[in-house]
Amino acid sequence: MGEDGNFHDIKRNYKYVFNITSVHGEGYGGLEEAADEYPINMNVDVIEWNREDEHIGVQGKYYLTMQRRNARLWSKAGATDQLRLTYEILDNTPGTSFAITFTTDKNGTQTPSTGTSPWPQVIQNDYFKVSLIHDTSTQTADFIVEALKDYTAGHDTDEVEIRFRDLIFHITITQLSDRYGDWEDGGNQDEELEDN
């Protein structure tokens, strides 16, 4: 039920989180009675997400959404992909910083981060560079992945862990063997056309 006193439809592929913000009266005598009756004497915040479009993490009174959990890069060095993160904090506990790290060293040893959140953070290994640019005023962050070398079989994937308070997400990086525009010109594939 919304603030207007009317019931609202429950939508498919959405996730709803109900945060009880205050209780201002008695409830029901037991669990079974409470389960069969309307919620009373409480204020509730409803957080609604479209689970089809975003990846969501919820922990207590804060949450984080990610546009997706994979970054795809074309084959050439310099190719980039950008993912958007948003968050909301509903408590007074301090802490709005992110931490990012590669989960393995298969593509070379990670260089230390060049900054600390909320300022831009940058990590890199021999094949990929990851930047996280955090804007605390809008509660958003841009996660930018860049290929440092041309596609190399065996070094075409990696994984980065993003931590926000107690929430952890893993981003899979994949560098494709195709280059941008291959679909337009056929790439390097030779074809023989027959005259009819």
Image: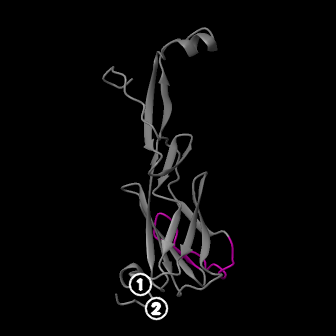
Q: Is residue 10 magenta?
A: no
**Which residue is depicted at the point 50% across and 35% down?**
17
Tell me: residue 65, above or below residue 19. below
Q: Is residue 4 left or right of residue 130?
A: left
Rate crowding at label 2 as few (under 14), some (14 to 19) or many (20 or more) other CA atoms within 10 Å.
few
Q: Is residue 2 left or right of residue 165?
A: left
User: Residue 175 in the image: x percent, y percent?
Assistant: 54, 77
Callout 1, which amino acid? Gly
User: Residue 111 in the image: x percent, y percent?
Assistant: 61, 80
**Which residue is depicted at the point 38% across and 81% down?**
181
Indicate the quadrant containing the N terminus: top left, top right, bottom left or bottom right.
top left
Q: Tell me the SS state at disc 2.
A: loop
Per the rendering, the mark at residue 186 is 1
Q: Nearer the viewer, residue 171 or 138?
A: 171
Residue at the front extreme? 196
Indicate the quadrant containing the C terminus: top left, top right, bottom left or bottom right.
bottom left
Per the rendering, the mark at residue 195 is none
The answer to whether one can see residue 27 in this image is no
User: Residue 44 in the image: x percent, y percent?
Assistant: 45, 27
| Main secondary structure along the magenta-highlighted residues | loop
Q: Nearer the viewer, residue 179 or 138?
A: 179
**Which residue is depicted at the point 52% across and 40% down?**
61
Quote the CA–CA distance across marks 1 and 2.
Answer: 8 Å
The answer to whether one can see residue 119 in this image is yes
Quadrant of the rendered image containing residue 186: bottom left
- Residue extent of the magenta highlight: 104-124
Q: Which residue is mark 2?
A: 190
